[in-house]
Amino acid sequence: MKTSGREWPAGVKKTRQRQAVLALLEQAEKPISAADIFTGTAAAGQDISLSTIYRILNYMEKKGVVAKAKLARSESVLYELNRFRHRHYAVCVICHRIISVNNCPLENFILNIAENDFRVTGHNVEIYGYCRECDGEAGGGR
């Protein structure tokens, strides 16, 4: 069984509500909030309460289907489909746009740490600044 181009996750009971949540996560180009998912499901004609969306997201996170991200300077929690890729994000301090960083700035640093008898199990990098639109408004210019 597929959502839209992806096999349905093994060990996860398929329901109409879970399908709707996963379809939105699959289409998202960046991590999104539960509120964004709620709005998206409502726009698609799905009647799913926000509390149900949170339960689905927590369940899917436990199953390894969804990855949860909490940005350091934000109260909101964001979710994305777990595509088993290593990701970092740049966050605009004005509009809070999230931009995916495609390479890991710590890759060589972690290799150096490993040479000193330390095994890194994970890390998180958030870069703060101004997106192109906000930089122009803030007078930063490029």
Image (tube, rainbow, N blue to C red):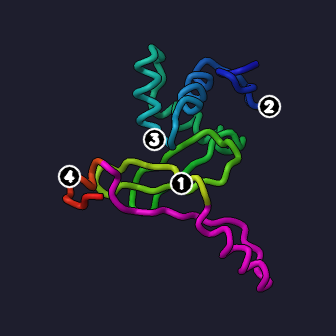
Few, some or many C-alpha atoms within 10 Å of disc 1 (few <14, some 14-19, many ≥20)? some
| Range shown magenta | 104-132
**Residue 102 vertical position relative to residue 41 in the rendered view, above or below:** below
Q: Is residue 127 left or right of residue 10?
A: left
- Give the label, 3 or 1, closer to the camera: 1
Residue at the image position 39 percent from the left and 57 percent from the top: 74
Q: Is residue 118 left or right of residue 45?
A: right
Q: Pinpoint residue 73: horizontal percent, then vertical percent.
A: 39, 62
Element type where label 2 sits in the image? loop
For the residues labelled 3 and 1, the Cα–Cα distance comes to: 19 Å
Q: Is residue 108 magenta?
A: yes
Residue topped by disc 1: 101
Q: Pinpoint residue 108: horizontal percent, then vertical percent.
A: 68, 72
Residue topped by disc 3: 33
Few, some or many C-alpha atoms within 10 Å of disc 4 (few <14, some 14-19, many ≥20)? few
Residue topped by disc 4: 137
Quadrant holding the C terminus: bottom left
**Residue 93 vertical position relative to residue 8 in the rendered view, above or below:** below
* Residue 93, image quadrant: bottom left
Which three-letter amino acid code belongs to the residue tagged 4?
Glu
Q: Pinpoint residue 38: horizontal percent, then vertical percent.
A: 44, 29
